[in-house]
Amino acid sequence: MYSSNLTGFILALVSSTFIGTSFIIKKKGLRKAGVSGPRASVGGYGYLLEPLWWIGMISMIVGEIANFVAYVYAPAVLVTPLGALSIIVSAVLAHFLLGEKLQKMGVLGCLLCIVGSTVIVLHAPEERSINSVKEIWELAIQPAFLSYTAAAAAIALVLIWYFSPRYGQTNILVYIGICSVIGSLTVMSIKAIGIAIKLTLEGTNQAKYFQTWIFAMVAITCIITQLNYLNMALDTFNTAVVSPIYYAGFTSFTILASAIMFKDYSGQSASTIASELCGFVTVLSGTFVLHSTREPDPPILTDLYTPLSPKVSWYIQSSGEHWKQKDEDGLSPNFITILRQDHFK
């Protein structure tokens, strides 16, 4: 079992590297696409035609595949918290590629993430042995997990239909909340599918069970929803803000969902559970220290008519009539724009 956890740990490291890189590449693609069309944050989909965004998407897919396999070999309470390492990767790359400066306290945040992740790995529970997807289905239809699923779906729908149109552009918790709640259900479905594939490759066909396909449909729906709102969050807010808050929310909900569904902490001593929770809190502290030392994105001009200064004097000459606005800000005559009617003929 411990060798299984080690395999999951290595795959989680690979996953974090690719996913952390994808955040930066996708952000550069979103910025480039936003120059020539509506931004993703206002419902634009021009980034789908941007090659750079697709490179980032491929990087994320590779990372998610590694993450997918990691869930087959190790419990979610081990794999998910290691996602903090992707924050370190994205923070370092953002410093060099996006101009989002990483301060000395940010380095301390990175170290806290590493220390916390190490504690989690050392005290992670063993992976539960499952021999059929029907066993996972029995776990999924427990009253406790059904209640969690219903609550998660209700929260996500309220955020999508009510809060997103009204507060999505100003409150990062709206988009990240959707991604985090839906993401916990994604992980549970992905783990079920991964185990089904593993058992099928070992000679026990799991495709014959309808439960496998239900898990697949849930996973696809949740993944599409996550990607859409994650794109909106990345395009609206600074990467340094999105990454740690997304990690904190996603990891917290996933650990909760896994604890309810798979009973990961069953049989563990109180000290072991406490040590793992301390490791998780250390990682959370590191992510927020890292976030607090980063600079916000500079404002982006949304159209060609956004003024470059609070007030600009102008002078219009039309049909011999003159109309001039006084320069109230003390601007020099060099800032005066002269418009002549014959220029528009």
Image (tube, rainbow, N blue to C red):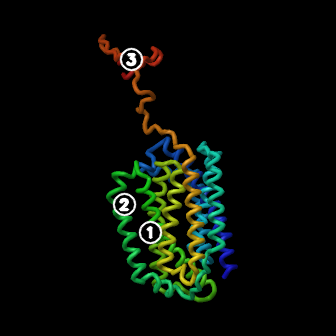
Q: Secondary structure at mark 2?
A: helix
Residue 204: image location, x then y, percent: 59, 89
Q: Is residue 172 left or right of residue 290?
A: left
Let me know if residue 339 appears in the view: no
Kindly indicate whether the residue at mark 2 contacts the one at mark 1 (C-beta within 8 angstroms).
no
Amino acid carrying mark 1 in the image: Thr
- Residue that mark 3 sits on: 327
In space, the residues marked 1 and 2 are separated at their CA atoms by 17 Å
Q: Of the residues under marks 3 and 2, which one precedes in the sequence?
A: 2
Kindly indicate whether the residue at mark 2 contacts the one at mark 3 (C-beta within 8 angstroms).
no
**Quadrant that contains the N terminus:** bottom right
- Residue that mark 2 sits on: 159
- Residue that mark 1 sits on: 221
What residue is rendered at 47% in x and 53% in y? 233
Q: Secondary structure at mark 3?
A: loop
Q: Is residue 163 left or right of residue 175?
A: left
What residue is rendered at 42% in x and 83% in y? 141
